[in-house]
Amino acid sequence: MDYRKITVAGSGVLGSQIAFQTSFKGFEVTVYDINDEALERAKERIEGLKPRYQEDLGATKEDVEAAYGRMSFNSDLKQAVAEADLVIEAIPEVVQIKTDFYKQLGAAAPRKTVFATNSSTLLPSQFAEATGRPGQFLALHFANEIWRNNTAEIMKHPGTDESVFGDVIAFAKAIGMVALPLQKEQPGYILNSLLVPLLEAAQLLLVKEIADVETIDKTWMVATGAPLGPFAILDVVGINTAYNIGLAKAKETGNEHDQKAADLLKSVYIDKGKLGRETGEGFYTYPNPSFLSPDFLRG
Ligand code: NAD
């Protein structure tokens, strides 16, 4: 099926980006959120995206205004999904909120509508029942700054119809994403299944005092040709997010080094306002971090 009308539910950080990217690529998009104040905030966020599309993608003013013109905003769920071929859900990462939402959505949406969750950490099978249409439900997971970091991980749950999986893969490509299909459910999808262990291993090398930040990053960069080492990646992810993940792991394992790694992020970085690239300092200082200096990879 060719999707034309898309509703994005939840218009926060990711929802605004998904909605704007989708309309930028020519689709008609309805943005849904719980009330009109939330939708006003979404409009402000989207205003902020327009210059980014112009700077990063070379889009013209006409392009971004035309994209905005294809968007509408509605806080009435039934109206917002009345014509939707596809609803992309980007509401808070809270099981109860999502479960309640899918029950309401399943009752409000036409029979044809497919639902996709952008959840980062929850599996679609957790909500399949609540949707009332498990065959037409799956995960479609984007990365922050979707217009530049254009991955779309498309993940089935055991009940997803094969044709729906194929249609959502085609849709992801149509909105400019590199479509990355996952044939089975996997917590963390592909990217975080690779990235989280790398970042954790780097932090353990540091707290065990095996090597310093720059040596660890240098090792990874020289040996694999990667443009960033794990600590430079942590600065992009943001130290708060890294801390939340690290703390959850320390609680789960009870491991002393995991706890030490979380404590280090809190006391040396978060408490001093060093939250990574967005604050200009984390493991490195920006805009000229040492790992970008020509000598970094030589010595
Ligand atoms: P956010 O807090 O910025 O936005 C959530 C939005 O959902 C808010 O506008 C809020 O008003 C709205 N909302 C709350 N309850 C709702 C309901 N019942 N119905 C409709 N809207 C509701 O959150 P976010 O960072 O955009 O994350 C949203 C989802 O996207 C989460 O599942 C998260 O895991 C996922 N995600 C986030 C990122 C990221 O970098 N922020 C990246 C990939 C995926």
Image (cartoon, rainbow, N blue to C red):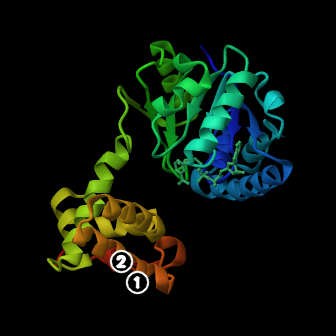
The answer to which quarter of the image holds residue 203 is bottom left
Work out whether residue 82 or residue 285 is closer to the camera in this orientation and state it: 82
Q: Does residue 41 sit above or below 188 in this rendering? A: below
Q: Are marks 1 and 2 in contact (CB under 8 Å)?
A: yes
What residue is drawn where x is 64% and y is 57%? Answer: 52
What residue is drawn where x is 54% and y is 40%? Answer: 118
Name the residue that disc number 1 marks: 267
The answer to which quarter of the image holds residue 294 is bottom left
What residue is drawn where x is 73% and y is 17%? Answer: 110
* Local secondary structure at mark 1: helix
What residue is drawn where x is 47% and y is 69%? Answer: 240
Location of residue 261 in the rendering, given as x and y in whole percent from the top left corner: 30, 73
Q: Does residue 165 sit above or below 208 in this rendering? A: above
- The answer to whether mark 1 is within 8 Å of ligand 1 is no
| Residue 202 visible in image | yes
From mark 1 to mark 2, how far is it between C-alphas? 6 Å
* Local secondary structure at mark 2: helix
Q: Does residue 269 sit above or below 163 in this rendering? A: below
Amino acid tagged 1: Ser
The answer to which quarter of the image holds residue 186 is top left
Name the residue that disc number 2 marks: 263
- Using residue 121 as the reference point, say whether residue 298 is left or right of it: left
